[in-house]
Amino acid sequence: MINFNQPHLTGKEAHYMYEAVSTAKLSGNGVFTKRCQAWFERRYGFRKALLTTSGTDALEMCAMLCELKPGDEVIVPSYTFVSTALAFLREGAKVVFADSMQRNPNIDAETLEALITPRTKVIVPVHYAGIACDMNAIMAVAKRHNLLVVEDAAQAIDSYYQSPDSKFPKPLGSIGHMAAFSFHETKNVTAGGEGGLLVVNDERFVRRAEIIWEKGTNRAEFFRGEVNKYGWVDIGSSFLPSEVNAAFLWAQLENIDEIQAKRKKLWNTYYSRLQALAAKGFFTLPDKPDYATNNAHMFYLVLPSLEKRTALIKYLKENGVGAVFHYLSLHSSEYYKARHDGRELPQCDRYADCLVRLPLFYDLKVEEVHHICDLLNTYYQ
Ligand SMILES: *Cc1c(COP(=O)(O)O)cnc(C)c1O
């Protein structure tokens, strides 16, 4: 059986976790947390990086930082994980769902303007499969209407946006006012199963982010010696991961280049082996716009119909390959459908019905990718 996903160990995790335990300082914001955060700030130029216990938590912190009032509107793609919408809904916002592009599942920047009302406060682009959204277009709309942009970069570690007007690609997560990453076990790097990162790029939100992170207290400033007592100063919650999780994550970050190289090799093998079947129209391969790089988070196919996708998943399963689909349209979910304004989101529904993900993880062997491609060739003969 080739599983759909398998978490990877670099070999140093247990060592660093033991080191964290032996310092007798296991709670959050210790040595490993600071080391990971500094690494993100240095490598990707994030203004402020704060580890969290999940990507969902990082999104919730973003929503809290946006200071939404009841009735404020937040534009979110419907084709995404629940947390993207839920984080803002919990803060009392009205979620307005946007459709995906035809070429890939990312939010369609051209549909945004029509969704904006005087109550709109935030746009939340999700970089699906680690492929950048059209950030120049999204940031331009946001600027025109004075909106905040929160990047859901949960899948987008080590991926970039190449603006046509700049020589230097920008790391995803560094473009919006803030961003959220996930280190869940299904992502490219994990903090031991669950974990996340809040990124704050806009200086206005830096101080408050740290306070919300530390249960509404100015504890972090106190420990840096910036204030001489600490107390309750704002809302917040407990968003800090334990040092054990940060130590696990550190072992993965140290190996990120190797992890990315292997994932890209597997991804490229799929892509070149499946060209011929795609040319015959059996499915389409992942789209990569000129402005996006590929971080090999995910390899997916888009089939012509739900029936064809169901049949393919069944065939792969019978042949020992775990392929999965995901994201039921949020606008027509059991929880949300009565709240939705009734607009049709056809591209979102198409991806929900027709997209299938193939196994892609560090310890997958190139020969196993060839085996999966051979099975697909047999199936379509
Ligand atoms: C994984 C994911 C999340 C949630 O991250 P968790 O760490 O599981 O809470 C949010 N948004 C997207 C797009 C994701 O893929």
Image (cartoon, rainbow, N blue to C red):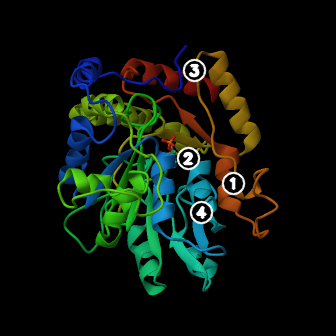
Chain-order first, disc 3 or disc 4:
4
What residue does disc 3 label? 321
Of residues 245 and 339, the one drawn nearer to the viewer in this rendering:
245
What residue does disc 2 label? 284
Chain-order first, disc 3 or disc 1:
3
On whether ligand 1 comes within 8 Å of the CB at mark 3, the answer is no
Callout 4 amino acid: Glu
What residue does disc 4 label? 91
Q: Position of residue 325 (x, y in %)?
A: 63, 37
Is any atom of residue 303 visible in this view? no
* CA distance separating discs 4 and 1: 18 Å
* CA distance separating discs 3 and 4: 40 Å
Q: Position of residue 122 (x, y in %)?
A: 52, 72
Q: Helix, strand or loop at disc 1?
A: helix
Is residue 381 placed above or below 68 in the rendered structure?
above
Q: Are marks 3 and 1 in contact (CB under 8 Å)?
A: no
Chain-order first, disc 2 or disc 4:
4
Residue 13 falls left or right of residue 307: left
Chain-order first, disc 3 or disc 2:
2
Which is closer to the viewer, label 3 or label 4? 4
Which is closer to the viewer, label 3 or label 2? 3
Q: Helix, strand or loop at disc 4?
A: loop
